[in-house]
Each structure stands twice: as C-alpha cells, then as structure tokens.
C-alpha cells in the first residue's frame, strides 16, 4: 500500500510539470518510472530480508535452545566419564594390582 | 572393563560345541520358553527413555529405612502446577505439598501408602499368593468427588504366558493375555563358522560370544476391557519382538490408537529409542526420538518429538544414596518452558 501511495505522489508532479514549463531537473528525475520502480524494489527487498532475518533468527533460537537442552549435558557427562575412567586407569597402573572392578562399581 | 570378561568365558562353549553336535540349540526350544513381560509393561523400555517424568520447581525426597523391610519416606514438592483449561494458554498456579509415605517391602508382600497434604491418599498392595498367582491392588482417595478409585488385579504367570484379570470401581473389568510365540536361542550358522576360527585364534572369542548369546523372542498378546460406568468397551492387540540388542513393539487398540516403538541398545551404556503414536479418532500423530545414557555417575535421558517439544532428565549421583536431579522441558509451540531440580536422599 505504501508503494502505491508513493507512486500516486510521483504521478502528481508529472501532471504539474506538464502545465509548468520551468520544472526542475530534480522533479523530472524523481518522477521518472525507473526511480519509482527502484524504490519499490528496494522496499520489497527490505521487507523480504527482514522477514528472512527474523525467521532465521527464530530457527537459530529454537535450534540453539534444543542443543543446549539435549547435547550440552551429554557432552559434559561424557567428558566427566572419560576423566573418571582415566583416573581409574592411572590409579590401577600406579598400584600395579589388577583392578578389583566389582568393588569399584 | 566389561570387554575383558567375554574372551575368558567364550572358549568354554566353543569346546563344548566342538565335541557335541550343534543339534540341540539349532531348533526352536519349545520346552523352555521363557515367561513374557506383563502386558501392561510391553512398552517399558520405550517409556523408560521417552516418557521421562519431567517436573517443574523443586522436589526433595528423603527415604529412611527403619529396618530391612520397613521404610518411611518424606517428600516436599514446590512449584507451579498446570491447571487444565479450555484456552490454548496454560495456566499455572504455585503449589507446595508435603507427602508422607510408608513402605513395607517383603519378597512376597509389598505395601505402599502415601498421604499428601491436600488430602490425597494412595495405597498399593502387591501380594504373591503362590509362585504363579499375584494379587495387586491400587486405590486412591481424594476429597474431590468422583476422583477416588480402586483397582484389583489378579495376575497369573504360567510357563510361557501371563494372564491378568482386572476389576475396579465404576464397573471396570479387564483381562489381558500374553504369550511367547517364538523363542530362538542360537543362530546356528554363524556359530559353526566361528568355532573353526576360534580354535586357531582365541581373541575372536568376542564375536562368538555375541552370536551365541543372541536370543530372540516374539510375544503376542491381547486385552479386553469394559467400563460399565461410561458404557465403553475395547479390544487391543500387542506384539513385542526382542533380542539382546533391540526391542520392537507394536500395539493396536479399538479406541483408535496405534503405537509403534523401537529401542536399540547401542552398547551397555547407551540405548536409543523412537516411537510413533497415531490416534485414528482424533487424527493426531506424534513421533519422538530419544536417547538414554547410563553412565557410572549419572543417567541422562533426552528426547525430542514432532510437536517440537524437547526434554531432558539428568540424574546425577553425587554420593552414595544422594542423587541430584535436573529436569528440563521446552515446548516452543506453546511457549511453555519447565525447569526443575531435585534432591533424592536415601
């Protein structure tokens, strides 16, 4: 709707320039069809890119929070487990005795 | 460490099979069919990893054993609880409860009672009358009308089947039956293949042990119920296929519900589960995928479903008899986020 009103606005000086011969070059440029089409394209592009940005932002938010809930605790716990295993292995090698697994578990 | 055990164990059956022909294990062992899982527990592995009891707020549980059989439990639950409403938005009101419970657990008699501060009382009894016959009773008393109920279950466990008869208030009657239909102990082909390998190289014991231990069960069951108060009746069928590495179940009920589930045990610590639920009457479909990690110090379960609902449940063992629980649930569609933490002592 905004583009339509703008086009209407640009149409008015066009008629006025027809009645008044001393119209400036600036109004001629602004009233030319290529400028109005460019304006429209720019506003369309802005609209689309805004929407795209918003939807990607939303998708990233959802993906990020899901990752935070599902994967981050898993990584932390796996890391802890690995550390625990390494510690146990070290202790076993230090003591030299065969590790008594049932008592450790 | 568990990987060290099989090589030592494996050579023994290998030598036994070398001397004796493999005939006895080849065919289906109809004489020694194991008992199937109870009908209502047919999906237990799937529910274990996909239906976590996520909660919101604080939870504190304390169990004190007075002697070997008798124990008392105290728990405090604080946090918002959802109120069922017609509108799309969920309404939550803050609540706080204290729950007192008494448990008596004996090998063949189990009595559990719980009292909440809002006046709810639940009681559960499980009594093994003989080796095969078990009586179970569940009762709930509330101060709201029409919410109190009681159910009696009679379970009979046979050699390769289980049957259950159920009766409750509101003229509820139900019966279910489940039987093992197929039970294969050994796939004989890979076994013969690896016995020759094993005689030359003892390290291959792992492979042989794996093939030897494969057991397959297929159990089929059905149920009937009649709820006299609501004038409803229904019929359901279920199938469960189980090997050492996976469990697959399927369930159909005349209420229009179709439930398929699959659990894959990737290793001793990890299992992955997926399920699919379809309701013919309400036409809603849900599928979910989840994992279940049982590590030495914690148990972590997570799942995501097709409604965009993500949840995770972490039980961390801080000390002997001291567990820390974290629970999270995100529902982006409903904008409903639930986080809870808890402590279990005893």
Image (tube, rainbow, N blue to C red):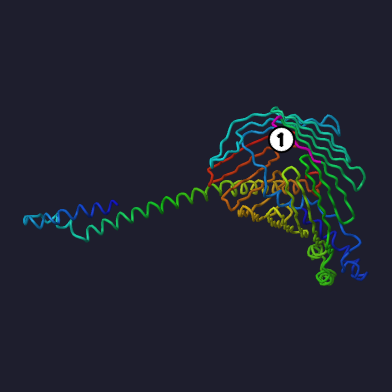
Q: Is residue B64 visible?
A: no
> Percent x, y for residue B180?
83, 59
Query: Which residue bears the numbered disc 1?
Result: B146
User: Which quadrant would residue A30 be assigned to in this image?
Assistant: bottom left
**Residue B295 forms part of the magenta stretch:** no
Q: Is residue B340 visible?
A: yes
**Residue B150 forms part of the magenta stretch:** yes
Q: Is residue A3 left or right of residue B342?
A: left
> Percent x, y for residue A72?
59, 47
Q: Chain of mark 1?
A: B
Callout 1 crowding tier (Cα within 10 Å): few <14, some 14–19, many ≥20 = few
> Percent x, y for residue B42?
76, 53
**Residue, x 26% and y 58% (percent of image)?**
A38
From this view, report whether residue B293 is shown above or below residue B85. Answer: below
Question: What kind of element bears circle 1?
Answer: loop
State the extent of the magenta-drawn residues as a range.
B143-151
From this view, report whether residue B20 is shown above or below residue B43. Answer: below
Q: Nearer the viewer, residue B66 or A18?
A: A18
From this view, report whether residue B216 is shown above or below residue B231. Answer: below
**Residue, x 66% and y 35% (percent of image)?**
B342
């Amino acid at each position: 709707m905004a583009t339509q009103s703008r086009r209407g606005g640009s149409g008015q000086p066009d008629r006025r320039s027809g009645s008044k011969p001393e119209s400036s070059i600036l109004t001629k440029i602004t009233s030319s069809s290529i400028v109005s089409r460019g304006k429209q394209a720019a506003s369309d592009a802005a609209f689309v890119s805004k929407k795209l940005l918003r939807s990607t932002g939303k998708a990233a938010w959802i993906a990020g929070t899901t990752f935070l809930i599902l994967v981050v605790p898993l990584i932390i716990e796996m890391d802890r487990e690995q550390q625990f295993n390494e510690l146990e292995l070290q202790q076993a090698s230090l003591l030299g005795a065969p590790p008594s697994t049932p008592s450790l578990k | 460490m568990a990987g060290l055990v099989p090589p030592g164990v494996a050579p023994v059956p290998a030598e036994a099979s070398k001397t004796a022909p493999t005939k006895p294990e080849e065919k289906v062992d109809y004489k020694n069919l194991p008992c199937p899982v109870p009908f209502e527990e047919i999906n237990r592995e799937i529910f274990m990893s996909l239906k976590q009891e996520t909660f919101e707020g604080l939870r504190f549980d304390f169990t004190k054993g007075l002697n070997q059989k008798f124990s008392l439990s105290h728990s405090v639950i604080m946090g918002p609880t959802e109120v069922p409403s017609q509108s799309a938005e969920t309404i939550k009101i803050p609540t706080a409860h204290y729950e007192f419970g008494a448990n008596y657990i004996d090998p063949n008699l189990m009595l559990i009672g719980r009292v909440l501060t809002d006046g709810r009382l639940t009681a559960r009894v499980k009594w093994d009358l003989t080796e095969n016959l078990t009586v179970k009773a569940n009762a709930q008393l509330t101060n709201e009308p029409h919410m109190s109920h009681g159910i009696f279950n009679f379970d009979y466990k046979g050699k390769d089947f289980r049957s259950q008869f159920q009766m409750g208030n509101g003229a509820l009657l139900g019966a279910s039956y489940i039987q093992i239909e197929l039970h294969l102990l050994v796939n004989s082909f890979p076994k013969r293949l690896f016995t020759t390998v094993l005689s030359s190289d003892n390290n291959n014991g792992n492979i042989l042990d794996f093939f030897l231990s494969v057991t397959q069960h297929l159990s089929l069951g059905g149920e009937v119920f009649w709820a006299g108060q609501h004038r409803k009746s229904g019929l359901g069928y279920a199938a469960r296929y189980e090997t050492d590495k996976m469990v697959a179940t399927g369930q159909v009920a005349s209420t229009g519900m179709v439930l398929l589930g699959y659990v894959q045990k990737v290793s001793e610590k990890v299992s992955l589960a997926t399920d699919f639920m379809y309701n013919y009457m309400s036409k809603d479909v849900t599928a979910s995928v989840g994992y279940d990690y049982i590590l030495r110090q914690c148990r972590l379960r997570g799942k995501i479903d097709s409604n965009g609902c993500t949840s995770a449940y972490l039980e961390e063992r801080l000390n002997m008899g001291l567990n820390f629980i974290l629970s999270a649930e995100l529902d982006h569609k409903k904008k409903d986020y639930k986080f809870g933490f808890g402590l279990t002592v005893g």
